Image (spheres, rainbow, N blue to C red):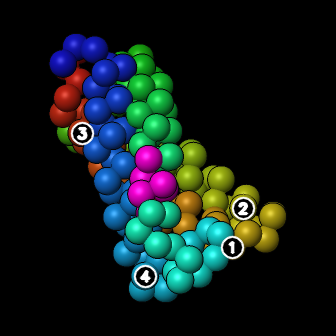
Amino acid sequence: MKNAILAGAVAGAVADIAVVASAYVFANIGVFEPLGGSMEIWTPSMWILLSVAHLSLDIFWGMIGGAAFSFLYSLIPGKDAVKGLYFGLSIWVIKDVAAGSYLALIMMEVNAGIMLIIVGFFMWIVYGPVLGYLYKK
């Protein structure tokens, strides 16, 4: 598709699945405690609420990422999904690794920092290739 904003919205919606699934798995195996408390309070309705909230943000920021991707397209090496993967990993480092390190090391919110870095990784390695596959210059 030639519309980068639409491609970004679709990629953001697909990435939402990766975000919620990875948060669920890593919270259940004890890598981090979900925000707001232990797994006992995270009923199915809480996970649905998280999914819907994340979906709206993922679509919104996915559209902005799609616009940025179209602007930077010729500067990113590779083709299609690989180009998108590089873009997604770049966003992950700039957004999640940077923010997670500040959360953990400056604000002493280690759990939130770890969660942001781990869950963000799965989001952006899904978002980028889907965006790269969908967007055609």
Name the residue beneath numbered marker 2.
103
Pointers 1 and 2 in contact (CB under 8 A)?
Answer: yes
| Rendered view: 59 above or below 72 | below
| Rendered view: 69 above or below 26 | above
Task: Give amino acid for label 3.
Answer: Val
* Residue 94 position in % (x across, y down): 56, 45
Q: Residue, x 30% and y 37% (percent of image)?
A: 11
How many C-alpha atoms fall within 10 Å of the one at disc 1: few (<14), some, or many (≥20)? some
* Residue 103 position in % (x across, y down): 72, 61
- Magenta range is 47-52
Residue 78 visible to an observer of this rendering: no
Of the image marks 2 and 4, the number of the one nearer the N terminus: 4
Residue 17: image tag: none
Q: Secondary structure at mark 2?
A: helix
Of the image marks 3 and 2, the number of the one nearer the N terminus: 2
Name the residue beneath numbered marker 3.
130
Task: Give amino acid for label 4.
Answer: Asn
Label 4, label 3: how many angstroms apart (C-alpha)? 27 Å
Which of labels 2 and 4 is toward the front? 4
